[in-house]
Amino acid sequence: MQITHKMVNIENDIPRSVRNIQMDLLDQLRAFVATAQSGSFTGAATQLGISNRLTSKYVAELEQRLGVRFFQRTTRKVGLTPAGSDLLARAPALLDDLDDLLADVTDSSKGLSGVLRISAPITFGEVYIAGMLARFAEIHPGITIDLRLSDAFSDLAAEGIDLAFRIGRFDISSLKVRRLGTFESLPVASPAYIARVGRPETPRDLSEHSCIIDTNRKNPKRWVFENSGGEVLAQVEGRFHVNSASAAIELARRGLGIAYVPSFTLRGALDNGDLVGLLDDFLGERGDIAAVYLEGRTLPRKVRALIDFAVSDFGSARSS
């Protein structure tokens, strides 16, 4: 999904010369952000809906205005200088705040508009977040969605991310957090695997089974369970090591071992009988599902709206 920053046109009572200077600076900042995020003037021009030449001109004028070079230019692409990286960490939020201010005070703008930059883990993003954003976009047609899926934690400031969805256990000391709920990891296997190898009765029995190792987990070969007696640990081994819960599920479907995956990835596979839950007398490891965002700035109206929608939508999904 592409980011689109529209050039703005504010009419008010300030002198024309001052207004022109302000508008020039806004256009220059928008051109800089689009170029930095796309990696080229051509990509930025496409996003902004202006010419390549004008995009390059705006960026050059901004560099001249501030006396700093923001890009190292090559024949094919541009790279950020340290000064450019510093500006990119702050400029998208500044422009978003301006867009939000204009939306709040302009009578003709009744709905939400602008770009929402969102990050999420790959499997959770594919299984849930993409659909949730589609439902949000249906009721807010003026919003453009830029969804970035990665199992690495994104740097919200450096990457200009408005909102990140995170799952599991994570360090949230530097971020504001809105918790959406929790999930449980479940051990599963195919009926064919159980018929061939047998069913484990306790977590410790897993050491005798072929397990599919999800390397995204903090301790991939150490599966944690709980019952009335407290925490029970299982040390597991297996031929298949993957960094995707979806891949682990597919391998388990094929009868190649036992997978230990988040509950939100399993609804279809359990409902249709492709996989069977194991160790019913034990609880699997639990983790949080949360929306996180940066501290120290006024939260744009569109981000607040998405957070509130996600809370409601996730609650509905869990009850269905």
Image (spheres, helix red, strand yellow):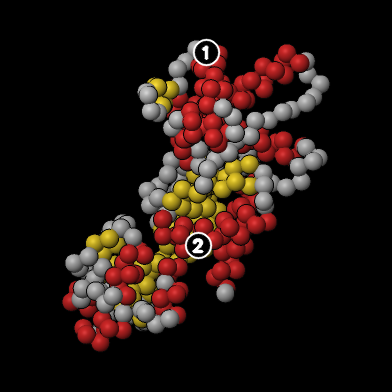
Q: Dividing the image into 4 quarters, which one contains the C terminus?
A: bottom right
106 up-or-down from 213: above or below: above
Q: CA distance from mark 2 to mark 1?
A: 45 Å
Whether residue 50 is visible to the viewer of this picture, yes or no, is: yes
Q: Amino acid at mark 1?
A: Gln
The residue located at (26%, 81%) in the rendering is 193
Q: Residues within 10 Å of mark 1 (few under 14, many from 20)?
A: few
274 up-or-down from 28: above or below: below
**Residue 286 occupies quadrant:** bottom left
Are circles 2 and 1 on residues that touch, CB within 8 Å? no
User: Where does label 1 land, which residue?
Assistant: 64
Left or right of 243, for residue 176: right
Sooner in the amino-acid sequence: mark 2 or mark 1: 1
User: Where does label 2 land, which residue?
Assistant: 128
Q: Position of residue 268 (x, y in %)?
A: 45, 75
The residue located at (67%, 20%) in the rendering is 22
Q: Position of residue 127 (x, y in %)?
A: 46, 63
Viewer-proximal residue, 92 or 168?
A: 92
20 up-or-down from 316: above or below: above
Left or right of 206, for residue 157: right
The residue located at (44%, 28%) in the rendering is 85
Q: Residues within 10 Å of mark 2 (few under 14, many from 20)?
A: some
